[in-house]
Image (cartoon, grey):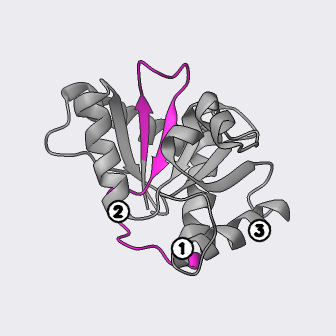
Amino acid sequence: THIAIAETPQLPHLLFFSDAAVIPYPTYEQFDAIVGYITDTFRSITGKAVPRVALTHCTEKVSEKFPLTLSYEQIKADAANKKYGEVEIAGPMDVKTACDAESGALKGISSPVVGNADILVMPDIEAGNTFYKTLTLFGGATIAGMLAGTTVPVVVTSRADSADSKFYSLAAACLKALR
């Protein structure tokens, strides 16, 4: 899977998200792998033991109309059984709710993740890629990108990424490989 790490002016911490470049429409098994890889990568790069993971979507409701929200329910059950180690996980929720506590309060959504997400799991490559490009163009973010699940570090950046983003991608892959 592709993991991006964003440094944004709006957040006091790095924001990890997946998948902007590899898996078009994840199945439950792929979401399971994504959550495992991204929480492991988060821990190895930040040194923080308990990541806060938001399973993002355009709705906060689990519904058969949106089958991936059913996968999210299984991921949350897996997390409750410690499959991913110590983790706070919630969703579905939109990105604003995940990163802005006031939005969660207005919607009546209560979770340690609301307003405090360290990790955003995107519903598909379209959302992930659009988010990646929007953060850099309109959000002033610098982003590092790499693959997880490979046998060796693989750096993946957008052709239009800045030199800093490409450098940080190499640095992130090195950090991941060392831990």
Q: Nearer the viewer, residue 56 or 43?
A: 56
Q: Earlier in the sequence, mark 2 or mark 3?
A: 3
Kind of residue at disc 2? Ile
Residue placed under numbered mark 1 in the picture: 68
- Can you tell which quarter of the image residue 105 is in? top right
* Callout 2 touching callout 1 (CB < 8 Å): no
Report, in whole angstroms, how far the alpha carbon at label 3 lies from the one at label 1: 15 Å
- Can you tell which quarter of the image residue 91 is in? bottom right
Report, in whole angstroms, how far the alpha carbon at label 2 lies from the one at label 1: 13 Å
Kind of residue at disc 3? Asp
The crowd level at tag 3 (other Cα within 10 Å; few <14, some 14-19, many 20+) is some
Kind of residue at disc 1? Leu
Is 27 situated left or right of 158 in this image? right
Q: Which residues are magenta?
A: 4-29
Residue placed under numbered mark 2 in the picture: 125
Which residue corresponds to the image point at 28% horizontal and 39% vertical from the top-left? 134
Residue placed under numbered mark 3 in the picture: 78
